[in-house]
Image (spheres, rainbow, N blue to C red):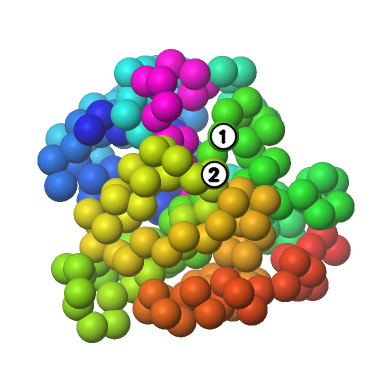
Amino acid sequence: MRIGIIGAGHIGGTLTRRLAALGHDVHVANSRDPQTLADLAAETGATTVWAADAATDADVVIVSIPQKNVPDLAPGIVAKAKPGAPVIETNNYYPQQRDGRIAAIEDGTPESVWVAEHLGAPVLKIFNGIFWKHLLERGAPAGAEGRIALPVAGADGPAKQVALDLVDQLGFDPVDGGTLDESWRQQPGTPVYGKDLDAERARQALAEASPERPAEFRAA
């Protein structure tokens, strides 16, 4: 598949490496000139592009940038993808640590719903709760004991199935995390976040999550 990735930090860069290694045609961008990603391109064979072009003709789009930078993305930045292409977002809201106060999220809007509103497109929330080194190194074959599960939140349908299959390709058990309105179940501070659980325990953790945001993940 042709996969456009906007953001080349820990998660975006790791997904570039893993997806290119799986044989996907990866087009990756950051917020600067594509030449600043020359080393990543040389390492992976990915194509570096301007952010405005990353989603062009993509079968899958991945947005992996700091939450506070989402409003800075160009309007319609994911609109050049193929019709029905899933748009995956990996972001987390860290108000005290990085992002400052985002009023709508503080008032209860799930982080990924807020992202979808800014992108003007439905999104799927994945890859936000796994340490990047584990995403890089701990994929395992289907059926392997202790295989790490990753929740996938978003609307049911073909796009979600593509995303679930992609998680499996990467070596993780895809777990349905419900609708995008339920994506708070995997936000920072929830029982599934950062825990590397197997599929059964991940489902249990999602069910046990509370919509109340922990103090460390609220604006001070």
Residue to which mark 2 is pinned: 155
Image check: 52 left or right of 149? right
Query: Element type at marker 1?
Result: loop
Which quadrant of the figure has residue 150? bottom left
* Quadrant showing the C terminus: bottom right
Is residue 34 visible from the viewing direction of this image?
no
Disc number for residue 131:
none
Left or right: 27 as drawn, with respect to 65 = left
CB contact under 8 Å: marks 1 and 2: yes
Task: Point out the image quarter for the N terminus.
Answer: top left
Amino acid bearing label 2: Ala
**Amino acid type indicated by mark 1:** Pro
Observer-nearest residue: 34 or 144?
A: 144
Query: For the residue labelled by badge 2, is the local secondary structure a helix, a strand or a loop?
Result: loop
- Across and down, in percent, residue 34 comes to 34, 24
**Residue 56: image location, x then y, percent:** 37, 18
Q: Residue at x 19, y 37 (%)?
A: 24
